[in-house]
Image: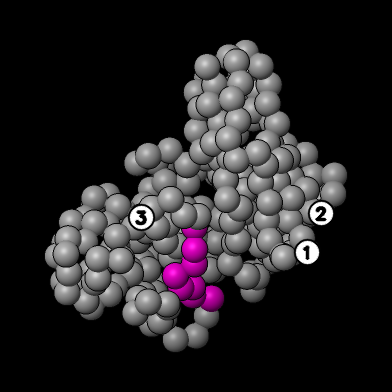
Amino acid sequence: AQSVSQHNHHVILSEAASLELGCNYSYGGTVNLFWYVQYPGQHLQLLLKYFSGDPLVKGIKGFEAEFIKSKFSFNLRKPSVQWSDTAEYFCAVFEGNNRLAFGKGNQVVVIP
Amino acid sequence: DGGITQSPKYLFRKEGQNVTLSCEQNLNHDAMYWYRQDPGQGLRLIYYSQIVNDFQKGDIAEGYSVSREKKESFPLTVTSAQKNPTAFYLCASSTGGQGGTEAFFGQGTRLTVV
């Protein structure tokens, strides 16, 4: 079974629309959580991360994510997307023993 | 510049041949990783290493082998036993540990087996 789940693999929305991408994980121990972005033709970049403390994490380019421990979730949000947010987004979970697992990704297309 | 270097960027091999992909990092990171990226599959973990001379299988280790003789190097061999080797391969590293950094990625190697 996949240890990191991302739903709605393809997301198409218009500029200024709000974006929310779901991420659920199954590992029951202490986790570090990440969202990475891959713009077309580019390598993976870190958007934001959660290690501890405030469960609402703010990242680059107006993105934020909320860690809800009881739901094993780390959903990514952006209130108003731009065409330049067209990319693939990956949720990742740092499990025990340094194992870093990724979800299948969300392909997001923003229409101008 | 500090970072992760994967070479080559593109690699072509004939079916039945083993091929080794290089990954070098100068970030002094303990942990290193190999992933395979296929469309719609995300990043699937092949092998990872927490420290020199140690490595663990990931989710899709069959047909692959690795070594970690030096801290900065984590080469991946794609053997002839791998049924579908054509893919984009990504190497990553991190400081490791529960309070460690996020993973940093190389530019990837696109392997095509013909």
**Label 2 vs label 1: CA separation?**
7 Å
Q: Position of residue B23 (x, y in %)?
A: 70, 46
As for residue B34 lying within the magenta part, the answer is no
Q: Is residue A99 left or right of residue A103?
A: right
The amino acid type, in three-letter code, at marker 3 is Glu
Q: Which residue position is annotated with label 2?
A: B71
Q: CA distance from mark 1 to mark 3?
A: 29 Å
Q: In which image quadrant can residue B69 be found?
A: top right
Is residue A30 placed above or below A60 in the rendered structure?
above
Q: Secondary structure at mark 3?
A: strand
Any part of residue B58 in sight = no
Q: Nearer the viewer, residue A76 or A28?
A: A76
* Mark seen at residue B28: 1
Q: How is the image coloured?
A: one colour
* Residue sitting nearer the eye, B113 or A48: B113
Query: In the image, what residue occupies the spot 17% across and 69% down?
Result: A15
* Quadrant position of the C terminus of chain A in the picture: bottom left
| SS at badge 2 | loop
